[in-house]
């Protein structure tokens, strides 16, 4: 099977997963009485402000932690979570340097190229 066919097969499998999830939810919905649905909606409504408050606090402290770790320049480990410091990436004008290498081939010994990678995305 060629790669394009495998990608098409993968898309079919993902669509099959989506369809299974839809069918499962339809069956769950079919056994829920209007009273139960109303009660679930009330519970969701009751907890919504609490989740919102916790999410806001969580976002604020996460921003503080990230800023502090960047300021420290090193990762910090808590009991359960850690915030990893990642140095800023260095980038170069590859086209410009490749042109420069034509006149200065001795610099090629400093050139490194990583392994290729692939990721699957929606077309």
Image: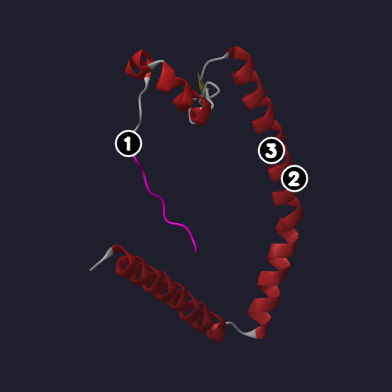
Q: Where in the figure is residue 26, as x and y percent of width and height?
A: 52, 82
Q: Can you tell which mark lies on residue 56? A: none
Residue 107 covered by magenta stretch:
no
User: In screen coordinates, is 1 left or right of 8?
Assistant: left
Magenta segment range? 116-123
- Please identify the residue farthest to the front as the structure is shown: 103
Exactly how many numbered labels are in the figure? Answer: 3
Whether residue 59 is visible here, answered yes or no, is: yes
The answer to whether residue 82 is visible is no
Q: Write the residue at 48% across / 31% down.
A: 80
Q: Position of residue 54 (x, y in %)?
A: 70, 43
Circle 2/circle 1 CB separation < 8 Å: no
Residue closer to the observer: 45 or 123: 123
Q: Is residue 31 left or right of residue 105?
A: right
Quadrant of res 5: bottom left
Mark 3 or 1 closer to N-term? 3
Residue denoted by label 1: 115
Q: Mostly what secondary structure, the magenta segment?
A: loop
Above or below — where is 12 with respect to 79? below
Q: Percent x, y for residue 50? A: 73, 50
Are dots 3 and 1 in contact, CB under 8 Å? no
Q: Is residue 37 above or below residue 94?
A: below
Measure the alpha-carbon separation of dots 3 and 1.
Answer: 35 Å
Between marks 2 and 1 in the image, the one whose residue lies nearer the viewer: 1
Which mark is in front, 2 or 3? 3
**Which disc is residue 53 wearing?**
2
Give the label on residue 59, or none. 3
Q: Secondary structure at mark 3?
A: helix
Q: Compare residues 78 and 69 and report the one nearer the observer.
A: 69
Does the segment drawn in magenta span residue 117? yes
Q: Is disc 2 in contact with disc 3, using a CB cutoff of under 8 Å?
A: no
């Amino acid at each position: 099977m060629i790669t394009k066919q495998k990608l098409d097969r993968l898309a079919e499998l993902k669509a099959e997963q989506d369809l299974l999830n839809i069918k499962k939810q339809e069956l769950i919905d079919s056994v829920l009485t209007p009273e139960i649905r109303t009660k679930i909606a009330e519970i969701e409504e009751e907890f919504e402000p609490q989740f919102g408050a916790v999410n806001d606090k969580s976002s604020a402290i996460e921003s503080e932690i990230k800023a502090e770790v960047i300021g420290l320049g090193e990762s910090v480990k808590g009991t359960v979570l850690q915030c990893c410091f990642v140095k800023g990436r260095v980038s170069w004008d590859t086209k410009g340097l490749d042109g420069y290498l034509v006149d200065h081939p001795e610099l090629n010994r400093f050139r490194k190229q990583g392994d290729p990678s692939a990721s699957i995305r929606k077309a």
